[in-house]
Amino acid sequence: MKKTILIAGLCCLAGFIIMVVLLIISRGDGAMFNSKDARYEQREYECREKTDEIYILSSSDSIKLLSGDVDKVKITYWERPGKHEYDLNESGGKLSLTRKDLKNINWGIYIGYQDTSIVVTVPKDFNGALDLNASSGSIEAKNTNAEYLTTNNSSGSVRVSNINSQNAVHCKNTSGSIRFENLTATDVTAQNNSGSIKMEDVNANGILSAENTSGSIHLTDVVATKDITCKNNSGSINFDRVTTDGSVNAANTSGGVHFESLKAGGNITLKATSGSVKGSIIGKESDYSILSKTTTGGNNLTDSRNGSKELNVNTTSGSIKINFEDF
């Protein structure tokens, strides 16, 4: 008898746990488990006039923006009748799409998946402003020109590739990676709380900034005309073939600062609280007035005040090893 009661109790507990897990997956919307109410309806819209600005505000739907063989901006998105819908507005050259959740909850036993990404296709000669926002879903923008590009995401990856912007590119994320590839803009900035930041083949005709709380920062084949700034709390900072006409400032709290073929027209400041500072700088050692200090670890630099530029290197727990490449 006791054994039967125990088995029944365990079954009830297992059922309760499954229900909670399904509720978490659905984010409180039980309709995604109901075969009748889980249906999605696709919407398509083509702009009536030339579009100079695009604004997207989603929640759990991913956003994909790309160029194609179209004359006007086209957008495809999905609605779930009675669960969520989108407000679409086109006026004065601006296209906006904003999601509204209706918060009706139904229960069922069906579990399904459907790609409900918002897909925006712009003409190949598009050169307007892009403002892409998502709460939980990835953001991808590629193969187009832009007046400026701004993305803001809470949970999900951000990827920007083959973009030529007349002005700034700014991407902000809370949880998920940020990746820039083959990007040209004036100022380039990336801010992340949890996840990596990677920039490859990036040209900034102004400043370049990468700030992270937890995750690595990696710059490869990056060129800037003004200052480059990288700050991290937990995770490595890596530079490979990074060049700037301005100064370089890299600071890390927990993790090293490592670089190869770093070239700067101005001062270089490298700091690591817990981690080493190692790498190579293009130029002569005599070009720099050097001030270096480490509390625990070796140091191959010799302090001097002879150069026209400053090289400041500081570590608390970690070694300093920097070589100079004089071509």
Image (cartoon, rainbow, N blue to C red):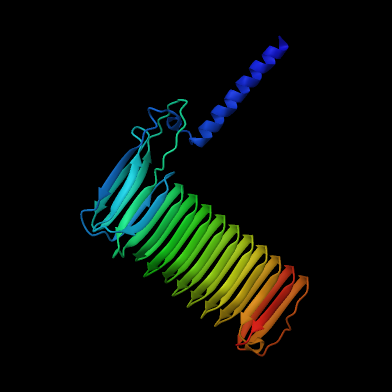
**Is residue 16 rendered to the left or right of residue 320?**
left
Q: Quadrant of residue 273?
A: bottom right
Residue 80, given in percent of the width and then of the height, sits at 36, 36
On-image quarter of the N terminus: top right
Residue 146, given in percent of the width and then of the height, sits at 35, 65
- Measured along the vertical axis of the image, is residue 291 above or below residue 50? below
Residue 148, given in percent of the width and then of the height, sits at 37, 64
Front position in the image: 208 or 325: 325
Residue at figure coordinates x 40%, y 51% from the top left = 63
- Measured along the vertical axis of the image, is residue 34 above or below residue 205? above
Residue at figure coordinates x 41%, y 33% from the top left = 103
Residue at figure coordinates x 49%, y 50% from the top left = 154
- Measured along the vertical axis of the image, is residue 19 above or below residue 44? above
Residue at figure coordinates x 73%, y 81% from the top left = 301
**Is residue 96 rendered to the left or right of residue 60?**
left
**Is residue 281 rendered to the left or right of residue 228?**
right
